[in-house]
Image (spheres, coloured by chain):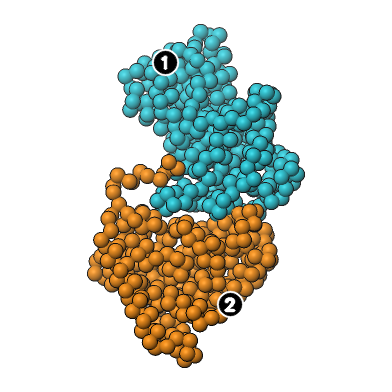
Chain colours: A cyan, B orange
């Protein structure tokens, strides 16, 4: 067991999986010699060669589209989209092709494919290097969307994604890469996709969230504990499929729910979580469901005051929690 | 090339034309909602298919490729099941519109409707072949209209940079539904675009199956030798509207259609086989009977086959 950053956990999992399965390949922009713009794939080309860790042309539709073909012809491709913001040229290949191929072929074809992409803000990335794009994909049947919130989960979820027979989008928060550290076992382990995890037990209210916001919620919860407010944190870990059972369980337990995400408020996953609770656990609630999310502006601005105003922070989470606790 | 081989090419061209004709009849009788035709493209499709290791090499077709998939081993019954949206349709179980081919058993890649997406899949299939060294070549088929899409260019570039065992096969019939090629591109030939990707661009008479066979065979050898992909442009013509819902009289003259029909590949290839005594008139008659029987059998079989159970709507969204 070693202490690793979130980034190292992802890299070591990629290495372990490449060693384990000769059919796995990695490719994308700058993933080879440079080891990726964030160094997630550093050293992998040197170890596994240019046939398995491939610097691709700068064309996202081709990166995903070739991965679909390669998956169907026997490989296990794990392409990287350099920034989640750059995934849009590949939307047609992801939504119309990868997600629909099993369905449209009546089960004759499948696409075992993992698309990794760094997402999220707070790193001075501005409009096109800060976006949270997960809700767009969570809308699409046929896709799975995974977002780890800890180094431990990053490893187990990535191994599961690579083993999965269906297309999985694996979003990694950029601000988590080096700021989050934790113990990660050396041996391979799997965390099932679609299973949420209670990261903190509490009684007064539940924060339901995922990704970087899990650690922000934990910081908020520590502050609130000193004020006598006991917070439960449910880390969704995957937003498609959602762990409906775990969502309802925590809602019923505390009777107060705050859903938190950095993605824009409207049409974000918080709406779906709220609807599920309203449909199946309304009479367990002691307060209206609250949502704390990125504002409905097109994307995150660059200049620090504007960026800070956009970001969901531990302070904002604590403030929303206090209001909810008082209700 | 043996006489038997040439006769087999002709048989599949004739089979495709007859299946196609029957589909139109079923449509006009109100028994099939929509038809997309390979009528006129048979030489390009069958000639190229016969240059491949059929069932082993991957083909990535588009909606025009009825003759191609028949030459590649899909049966007339399977085509008719697909046309009529029956449960047994192996392309999609009745989920997709007709002419959205896909049959894993024969290495016919599943296809959607957005044009040029399939070009990239061919590059990806070929990428796997390069890594796995499986000896397969992957061939994307597409119309000239789709070469305006970015994904066409991305696919050629990717395949050429990585010297993938791929072939890009354009069936240029001069029209993307109603839009003529001159409004689609500022070059005369799709093949000219190959130069931008560092690969050969070959123009071939798409109404001559033997010439198409030859250029495809060369492209396949090149791909397997590790020399990278080839762009083949087969110049041809469709003799019918884009689909059963189209009316081509508004965008092309009857004279133009009549002029091309003089070069109907079914007629010219049949004449070639008879004139060169590769095929006797008795053999031809027997073959025509065989085609007719196959089409009747396929129609009867598909019409009697069951429609999908509505309870299957939710199947195959994910594995298991």
Q: Is residue B45 left or right of residue A115?
A: left
Farthest residue in the left direction? Answer: B29
Residue at x 61%, y 57% (from the top left corner): B134
Q: How many marks?
A: 2
* Dot 2: element: helix
Examine the image and state in which quarter residue B24 appears: bottom left
Residue at x 45%, y 12% (from the top left corner): A203
Residue A196 location (% of width, % of height): 48, 27
Instruction: Give B185 or A95, whichever is nearer the viewer.
Output: A95
* Residue density around tag 1, few if under 14, some if 14–19, many if 20 or more, within 10 Å: many
Residue at x 47%, y 77% (from the top left corner): B9
* Dot 1: element: helix
The answer to whether residue A177 of the structure is visible from this angle is: no
Position of A67 relative to B113 (above/below): above
Residue A39 location (% of width, % of height): 70, 38
Instruction: Give B122 or B220, whichever is nearer the viewer.
Output: B220
Position of A24 relative to A172 (above/below): below
For the residues labelled 1 and 2, the Cα–Cα distance comes to 74 Å
Q: Is residue A53 left or right of residue B99?
A: right
Question: Which disc number belongs to residue A254?
Answer: 1
Farthest residue in the bottom direction? Answer: B275
In front: mark 1 or mark 2?
2
Residue on which disc 2 sits: B214
> Which quadrant: the C terminus of chain B?
top left
Residue B14 location (% of width, % of height): 40, 77
Residue A165 location (% of width, % of height): 50, 43
The reply to whether discs 1 and 2 touch (Cβ–Cβ < 8 Å) is: no
Residue at x 46%, y 39% (from the top left corner): A138
The answer to whether residue A235 of the structure is visible from this angle is: yes
Circle 1 marks a residue in which chain? A
């Amino acid at each position: 067991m070693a202490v690793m950053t979130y980034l190292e956990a992802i890299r070591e999992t990629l290495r372990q999986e490449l060693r384990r399965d000769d059919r796995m390949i990695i490719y994308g922009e700058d993933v080879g010699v440079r080891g990726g713009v964030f160094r997630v794939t550093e050293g992998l080309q040197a170890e596994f060669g240019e046939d398995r860790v491939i610097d691709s042309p700068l064309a996202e539709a081709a990166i995903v589209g070739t991965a679909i073909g390669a998956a169907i012809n026997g490989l296990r491709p794990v392409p990287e989209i350099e920034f989640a913001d750059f995934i849009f040229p590949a939307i047609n290949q992801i939504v119309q092709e990868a997600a629909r191929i099993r369905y449209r072929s009546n089960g004759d074809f499948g696409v075992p494919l993992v698309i990794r992409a760094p997402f999220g803000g707070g790193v001075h990335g501005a409009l096109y290097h800060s976006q949270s794009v997960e809700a767009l994909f969570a809308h699409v049947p046929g896709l799975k969307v995974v977002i780890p919130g800890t180094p431990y989960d990053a490893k187990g979820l990535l191994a599961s994604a690579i083993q999965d027979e269906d297309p999985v989008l694996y979003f990694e928060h950029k601000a988590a890469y080096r700021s989050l550290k934790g113990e990660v076992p050396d041996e391979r382990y799997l965390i099932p996709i679609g299973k949420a995890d209670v990261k903190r037990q509490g009684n007064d209210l539940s924060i339901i969230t995922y990704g970087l916001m899990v650690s922000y919620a934990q910081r908020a919860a520590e502050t609130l504990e000193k004020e006598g407010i006991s917070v439960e944190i449910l880390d969704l870990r995957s937003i498609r499929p959602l762990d409906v059972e775990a969502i309802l369980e925590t809602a019923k337990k505390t009777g107060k729910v705050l859903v938190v995400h950095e993605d824009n408020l409207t049409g974000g996953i918080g709406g779906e979580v709220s609807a599920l609770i309203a449909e199946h656990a309304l009479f367990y609630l002691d307060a209206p469901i609250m949502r704390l999310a990125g504002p409905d502006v097109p994307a995150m601005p660059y200049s620090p005051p504007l960026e800070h105003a956009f970001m969901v922070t531990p302070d904002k989470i604590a403030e929303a929690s206090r209001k909810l606790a008082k209700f | 090339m043996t006489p038997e081989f040439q006769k087999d090419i002709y048989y599949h061209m004739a089979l495709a034309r007859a299946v196609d004709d029957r589909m139109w009849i079923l449509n006009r009788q109100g028994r099939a909602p929509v038809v997309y035709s390979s009528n006129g493209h048979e030489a390009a499709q069958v000639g190229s298919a016969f240059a491949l290791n059929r069932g082993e090499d991957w083909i990535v077709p588009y909606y025009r490729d009825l003759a191609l998939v028949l030459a590649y081993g899909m049966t007339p019954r399977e085509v008719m099941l697909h046309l009529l949206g029956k449960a047994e349709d192996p392309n999609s179980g009745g989920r997709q519109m007709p002419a959205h081919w896909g049959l894993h058993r024969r290495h016919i890649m599943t296809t959607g409707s957005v044009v040029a997406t399939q070009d990239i899949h061919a590059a990806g299939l070929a990428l796997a072949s390069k890594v796995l060294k499986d000896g397969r070549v992957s061939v994307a088929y597409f119309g000239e209209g789709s070469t305006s899409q970015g994904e066409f260019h991305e696919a050629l570039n990717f395949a050429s940079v990585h010297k993938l065992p791929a072939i890009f096969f354009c069936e240029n019939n001069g029209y993307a539904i109603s839009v003529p090629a001159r409004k689609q591109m500022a070059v005369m030939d799709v093949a000219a675009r190959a130069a931008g990707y560092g690969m050969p661009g070959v123009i071939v008479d798409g109404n001559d199956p033997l010439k198409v066979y030859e250029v495809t065979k060369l492209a396949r050898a090149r791909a397997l030798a590790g020399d990278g992909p080839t762009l083949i442009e087969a110049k041809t013509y469709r003799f019918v509207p884009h689909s059963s819902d189209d009316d081509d009289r508004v965008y092309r003259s009857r004279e133009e259609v009549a002029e091309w029909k003089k070069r109907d590949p079914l007629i010219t290839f049949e004449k070639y086989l008879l004139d060169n005594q590769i095929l006797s008139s008795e053999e031809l008659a027997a073959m025509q009977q065989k085609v007719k029987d196959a089409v009747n059998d396929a129609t009867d079989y598909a019409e009697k086959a069951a429609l999908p159970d509505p309870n299957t709507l939710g199947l195959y969204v994910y594995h298991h």
